[in-house]
């Protein structure tokens, strides 16, 4: 194998594999992806796989739209199933302000050509008959939403990229980055050295320590994120279709059907950051210890909204780390102080946005300019170092805000 590549991608999660695929689709195939463990071994393998078209922020909606299209293209090209379940989603509104915000999104979705409707409580009960709609004023309905198998989606892109000529090395931990006098980069994995013109850092919450090696302070932190899976329930077993995903800002959380039970993603009111002083480099394909005490308040609200949970019982509680920058947006684009260094880290809804973000970045890298304006994700928004304490406080506030939609986001 040559040791000089046009681009080296660090990290084999859904984002890194998406970038390898995006570059290959655009003809850049002298590329290498380095993964310290196995593909998907970071956050990707245990994600619920939810893919919505409803952006937390209107500026990000295009990433959601492009993600599913990318996974579907890679599935067709590679033959690797992404196991997409098209269930649609309902984002509940329990306040007049939320209804106003949802209605104001209609022209944006019209422009994007994405099906979107604001529906009444009666329509909600028809779409999701197993939910208590007390206090609900309406919902934003995105019928093209659903969930994918995150591993399938990642492998479909990795396999398609490889078939076009890209290389992937697993069990290769990047432990050094150097800019040479001639302007190239050297990427070290133990005794092995790979040379390249461009590096893409898709190493999620490990990226902060990696970039500190070259004196860059990129505010990327990890948060604990719980999901609860219930046992099967006869009311779900008897349905002839799969229930849509519900996003309820009052819990706050997302609830979808998993087999014949429910899977609940919880956004804790008192969230917990994980290893803010540094991620253990040896942390691999692992989950964290769940803390069920912290979840009780959310679970009670869930049982009120979905009474069947009480008789179904809880089957499993997972707790996994999520990557969060202080403003909640991923960090995508060039690091202007270090020519040839590109960022693609900080995704906390990386299944929903990873494929689209990879298309966005690949286009930018190959054509020299971003395909559309998305300043909210640019790495230079953190040009001044943010003290850890302040960064984490911002992250906690953003995470615990759950599903609220800031008014100014809706205006774009
Ligand atoms: C419980 C839970 C449920 C979730 N559910 C959803 C969901 O339904 N929908 C959704 O959109 N998102 C969900 N997420 C979030 C989603 O999992 C992440 O946003 C996404 O997987 C991030 O992908 P990534 O490629 O950026 O990072 P990762 O998947 O973490 O990939 C980073 C990779 O970099 C590698 N790496 C790190 N350091 C090095 C190094 N030095 N050298 C080489 N390789 C290195 C790691 O091994 C890892 O494989 C969930 C997360 C959790 C915790």
Image (cartoon, grey):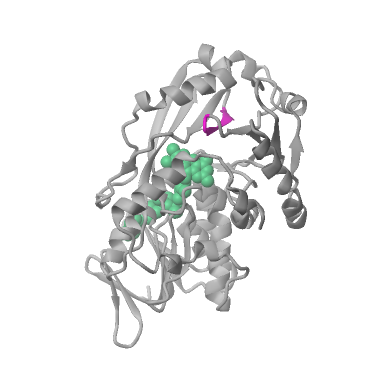
Work out which quarter of the rendered image holds the C terminus and state it: bottom right
Location of residue 1 in the rendering, given as x and y in whole percent from the top left corner:
37, 73
* Left or right of residue 146, residue 176 in this image: left
Q: In this view, does 106 lie above or below 249?
A: below
Visible in this render: residue 67?
no
Instruction: Give 365 or 136, whichever is nearer the viewer.
Output: 136
Visible in this render: residue 244?
yes
> Residue at (44%, 21%) from the top-left corner?
315
Instruction: Give 116 or 24, whichever is nearer the viewer.
Output: 116
* Left or right of residue 189, residue 333 in this image: right
- Residue numbers of the magenta segment: 251-258
Location of residue 262 in the rendering, given as x and y in whole percent from the top left corner:
55, 25
Magenta segment's dominant SS is: strand
* Left or right of residue 115, residue 92 in this image: left
Q: Is residue 51 above or below residue 167?
A: above
How many numbered callouts?
Answer: 0
User: Which residue extends farthest left?
Assistant: 191
Whether residue 388 appears in magenta in the rendering, the answer is no
User: Which residue extends farthest top?
Assistant: 311
> Residue at (62%, 70%) from the top-left corner?
371
Q: In this view, does 54 lie above or below 174?
A: above
Q: Quadrant of residue 203?
A: bottom left
């Amino acid at each position: 194998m040559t040791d000089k590549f046009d681009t080296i991608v660090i990290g084999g999660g859904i984002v890194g594999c998406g970038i390898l695929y995006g570059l290959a689709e655009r003809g850049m195939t002298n590329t290498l992806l380095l993964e310290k463990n196995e593909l998907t071994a970071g956050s990707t393998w245990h994600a619920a796989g939810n893919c919505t078209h409803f952006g937390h922020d209107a500026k990000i909606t295009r990433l959601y739209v492009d993600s599913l299209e990318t996974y579907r293209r890679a599935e067709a090209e590679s033959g690797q199933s992404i196991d997409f379940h098209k269930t649609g989603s309902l984002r509940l509104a329990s306040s007049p302000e939320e209804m106003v915000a949802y209605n104001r999104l209609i022209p944006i979705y019209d422009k994007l050509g994405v099906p979107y409707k604001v529906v009444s409580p009666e329509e909600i009960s028809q779409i999701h008959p197993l939910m208590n709609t007390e206090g609900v004023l309406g919902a934003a309905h995105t019928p093209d939403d659903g969930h994918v198998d995150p591993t399938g989606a990642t492998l479909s892109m990795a396999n398609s990229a490889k078939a076009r000529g890209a290389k992937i090395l697993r069990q290769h931990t990047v432990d050094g980055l150097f800019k040479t006098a001639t302007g190239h980069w050297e990427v070290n994995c133990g005794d092995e050295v790979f040379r390249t013109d461009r590096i893409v850092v898709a190493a999620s919450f490990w990226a902060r320590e990696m970039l500190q090696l070259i004196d860059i302070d990129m505010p990327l932190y990890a948060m604990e994120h719980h999901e609860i899976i219930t046992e099967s329930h006869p009311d779900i077993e008897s349905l002839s279709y799969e229930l849509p995903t519900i996003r309820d800002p009052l819990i706050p959380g997302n609830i979808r059907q998993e087999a014949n039970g429910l899977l609940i993603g919880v956004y804790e009111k008192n969230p917990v950051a994980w290893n803010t002083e540094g991620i253990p480099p040896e942390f691999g394909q692992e989950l964290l210890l769940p803390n069920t005490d912290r979840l009780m308040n959310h679970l009670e609200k869930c049982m009120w909204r979905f009474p069947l949970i009480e008789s179904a019982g809880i089957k499993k509680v997972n707790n996994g780390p999520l990557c969060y920058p202080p403003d909640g947006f991923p960090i995508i684009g060039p690091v202007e102080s270090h020519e040839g260094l590109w960022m693609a880290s900080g995704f906390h809804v990386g299944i929903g946005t990873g494929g689209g973000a990879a298309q966005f970045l690949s286009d930018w890298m190959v054509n020299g300019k971003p395909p559309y304006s998305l300043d909210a994700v640019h790495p230079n928004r953190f040009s001044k170092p943010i003290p850890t304490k302040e960064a984490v406080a911002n992250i906690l506030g953003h995470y615990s805000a759950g599903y609220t939609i800031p008014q100014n986001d809706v205006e774009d």
